[in-house]
Amino acid sequence: MMSYQLKLERCAAGKDREYVRHLFFTLLTSLGLHGRTMTEFEFYPLGLAVAVVLEESHATMHTWPEMSEIQLDIFHCGELVDDFEEVLIDQVNQLFLPGNITGVVVDRNTMEIITAF
């Protein structure tokens, strides 16, 4: 079981709720993940929180448009392709166009940080 936690900074995409929601689902699909149900909450006047139950586990997105920041958490319990982390970062860069990405990959069985970037 792996957890991928990313912080996207200087990310203008978060200002448009519909657009950023679309980007999130596009990201999940491009990673081969299968969404089953979704819930969300829109903050006033800005911001969005989305949680998606996946066949593989779950994913969340939180936006802070006033800070141009988006945080993504993807929890995965199944088998992944060997280069999943690289594909994830590449897709996030292509879709969300952040100025900077930081994150961690955590083994959920041991809670050991596998990678920090």
Image (cartoon, helix red, strand yellow):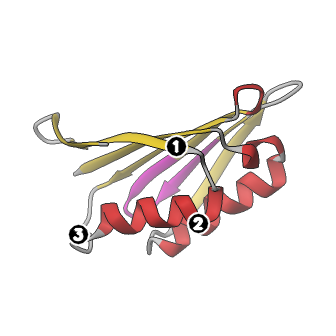
Name the dominant secondary structure of the magenta segment: strand
Determine the residue positioned at 86% across, 24% down: 44
The foreground one among 87 and 49 is: 87
Q: Earlier in the sequence, mark 2 or mark 1?
A: 2
- Expressed as whole percent of the image width and height from the top left, the position of residue 48 reads 73, 37
Total labels: the figure holds: 3
Q: Earlier in the sequence, mark 3 or mark 2?
A: 3
In front: mark 3 or mark 2? 2
Any mark on residue 71, and which?
none
> Residue under circle 3?
79
Determine the residue positioned at 43% across, 59% down: 89
- Expressed as whole percent of the image width and height from the top left, the position of residue 114 reads 16, 44
> Residue under circle 2?
94
Q: Is residue 1 left or right of residue 49?
A: left
The foreground one among 100 and 81 is: 100
Determine the residue positioned at 51% across, 66% down: 91
> Residue under circle 1?
100
Q: Which stretch did the figure color magenta? A: 50-59
